[in-house]
Amino acid sequence: MCRHLAYVGPSVRVGEMLTLGSHSLRTQAWVPRDMRHGGTINADGFGVAWWVAAPDESVTVSRYRNAAPIWTDPAVEEVLPQLESTAVLGAVRSATVGMPVERSACAPFVRDRWAFSHNGVVPDWRRTLTSVAAEFALTAAELGAEELFAPARLLEVESATDAAMLWVLLCDLLATGSPDGEWSAAAAAVRLLVAAILDRTPDARLNLLLSDGTQVWATTCHHSLSALVTDTFAIVSSEPLDDDPRWQAIGDRSVVAARPGALSVDALF
Ligand code: GLN
């Protein structure tokens, strides 16, 4: 299992978000408190995404990853604090047995203005997720979007892991959009993905974390998650970063949407 966090709010130093608090993400890499059947430490690499506004005001996501343990990488204290952003998504990894330990397997996975992390495991992930893709492809074809969930798309998977494959599927779900706007479209996408996987493998563990740099969406399915949302910032994290009493534990089987001043927690199904 892994630990992850996402922040949206006033500009912060990217490196600092990894070391912030008495129980920072970096600390959670070697002494997590709430692993729930998923290994003991998160030593198989880490990654962090942050958002950058171009002169034309379009926003894209940038990323740094390393397959080494986060506590061994001097960039965390020497380089990443020089970068500032109004949003950060970070993850430390404990590779699932049988999955490769390599940089391309480390979250966050990114595309356009999206960044994504998965904490958990999809049993028999190749069979399960190609079956999900086949189901989604039928719906996409009915909508005239044959390229979505097509075999060529699935081959874009960055690493041979469940998490990387989840990201390919989620990207295509996000591409289908929703007339109700992004807040509900992203929540609907993660919900649909979790539901389709649990239909096939009910013991899948699916804590997903997604951000576009202005909002954060997350699911809880087996693993821990907490949120601290004020009028100025929102943090969603596998474990609270400190003992601030405003941290709220998120119950299992929830879908979370958060931004500064707003937190919604609904039942997944
Ligand atoms: N299964 C994912 C991976 O191996 C996530 C692992 C985890 O949550 N420990 O990358």
Image: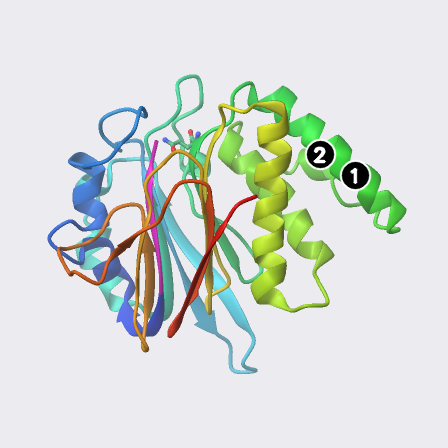
- Inspect the image, locate mark 2, and give the three-letter code of the amino acid beneath it: Ala
Cβ atoms at labels 2 and 1 below 8 Å apart: yes
The residue under label 2 is 133
User: Which disc is residue 162 wearing?
Assistant: none
The majority secondary structure of the magenta stretch comes to strand
Q: Does the magenta stretch include residue 4?
A: yes
Lateral position of residue 239 relative to residue 185, left or right: left
Q: In percent of the image, x 52 and y 21: which residue is there?
A: 123
Camera-nearest residue between 138 and 265 = 265
Is label 1 in a helix, a strand or a loop?
helix
- Inspect the image, locate mark 1, and give the three-letter code of the amino acid beneath it: Ala
Q: In percent of the image, x 64 and y 41: which residue is there?
A: 169
Label 2 environment density (alpha carbons within 10 Å; few <14, some 14–19, many ≥20):
many
Which stretch appears magenta? Answer: 1-7
Camera-nearest residue between 63 and 163 = 163
Residue 250 versus residue 53 in the image, above or below: above
Q: Please say which color scheme the image uses.
A: rainbow
Q: In percent of the image, x 23 and y 26: which residue is there?
A: 40
As drawn, the residue found furthest toward the bottom would be 56
Camera-nearest residue between 104 and 123 = 123
Q: Where is residue 142 in the image (x, y as percent from the top left)?
A: 89, 46
Report the quarter where the N terminus lies: top left
Q: In percent of the image, x 25 and y 32: which residue is there?
A: 43
Camera-nearest residue between 57 and 29 = 29
Q: Position of residue 9 (x, y in %)?
A: 34, 73
Is label 2 in a helix, a strand or a loop?
helix
Find the distance from the CA under tag 2 to the CA under tag 1.
6 Å
Q: Position of residue 18 (x, y in %)?
A: 24, 54
Ligand 1 falls in quadrant: top left
The residue under label 1 is 137
